[in-house]
Amino acid sequence: MSVTDHVRAYHDRLAGDEHHRLRSWEHCFRYFRRVGPTGLADDRDTAALQLGFYLASWGMYRGSTFLLQRAYTVHRPVIDCLAEPRFQHLWQREFGAGQHDDELRQLVFDAVAAVRRAYAPFGEATDTLVTKVLLGTIGCLPATDRYFLIGFKGDGNSYSVLNAAFVDRLLLFSRDNAADLQCEQDRIEMQGGLRYPVMKLVDMYFWQRGRELDSSPEPGSE
């Protein structure tokens, strides 16, 4: 199956169901794009609720995670840091869609570090949590969850931690498949009115690959 086939297989799971769990990302991302960084300070509680429900829907409130023991207000510091002026370019430019994305790499890592610091008083933010936050708000990284990593490694890539080598591989994949990804962006936007960022499509591709490669899926592992 091609990149297009995998992205469509993922998207087809929710295309006919407006209440599908995977749509939680859409609701969250659409909200953050509509409000933008300048509006977050005036609406930080709503923003924290949007982010919290999306993360819960995407499995970040189960088990022994520190978020399970906290109210939605735990996300307020994250909202504050993402609204900082220094991240303006991440909001304005689509990471993975341009020829000069290398210029944004350090800013992406700055955002990763800022999210970790925002959660630090409450618990340790894993790579999975940080990337899900950034995917649901700015859209600058895919979510490094179980299925994504199975698919990523299944395509011959290595992964140990969220580092420069990982981001470089994402950018290479985006450039090599730019035409297919852009076509899927256009198709999805025409269907639902929301333009998925490139890194969301990258997330969908590798997640679908991982789901297909996983021989023994566990309940709730998605």
Image: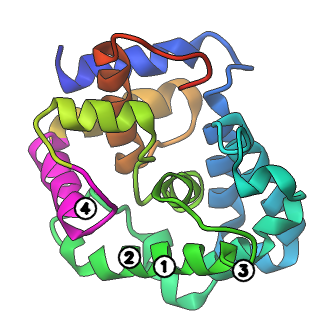
The residue drawn where x is 56% and y is 55% is: 129
Residue 109's tag is 2
Numbered disc 4: secondary structure: helix
Give how far apart the Cα atoms at labels 4 and 3 are: 24 Å
Q: In the current view of this chain or complex, which residue is farthest to the bottom?
A: 86
Any magenta on residue 177? yes
Q: Is label 1 in contact with label 2 (beta carbons under 8 Å)?
A: yes
Q: Nearer the viewer, mark 2 or mark 3?
A: 2
Task: Using the image as rendered, state which of residue 39 and residue 169 is in the foreground.
Answer: 169
Q: Is label 4 in contact with label 2 (beta carbons under 8 Å)?
A: yes
Q: Nearer the viewer, mark 1 or mark 3?
A: 1
Give how far apart the Cα atoms at labels 1 and 4 are: 15 Å
Q: Which residue is mark 3?
A: 80
Which span is picked out in magenta?
Answer: 159-178
Give how far apart the Cα atoms at labels 1 and 2 are: 6 Å
Task: Using the image as rendered, state which of residue 14 and residue 215 is in the foreground.
Answer: 215
Q: Quadrant of residue 101?
A: bottom left
Q: Which residue is mark 4?
A: 167
Q: Which residue is mark 1?
A: 113
Mark found first going from the N terminus, 4 or 2: 2
Confirm whether residue 15 shows in the render. yes
Identify which amino acid the numbered label 2 is placed on: Phe
Give how far apart the Cα atoms at labels 1 and 3 are: 14 Å
Mark found first going from the N terminus, 2 or 3: 3
Give the overall secondary structure of the magenta segment: helix
Identify which amino acid the numbered label 4 is placed on: Val
Q: Is label 1 in contact with label 4 (beta carbons under 8 Å)?
A: no
Numbered disc 1: secondary structure: helix
Q: Residues within 10 Å of mark 1 (few under 14, many from 20)?
A: few
Confirm whether residue 186 shows in the render. no
Identify which amino acid the numbered label 3 is placed on: Asp
Q: Give the image location of residue 204, x and y in percent.
A: 39, 32
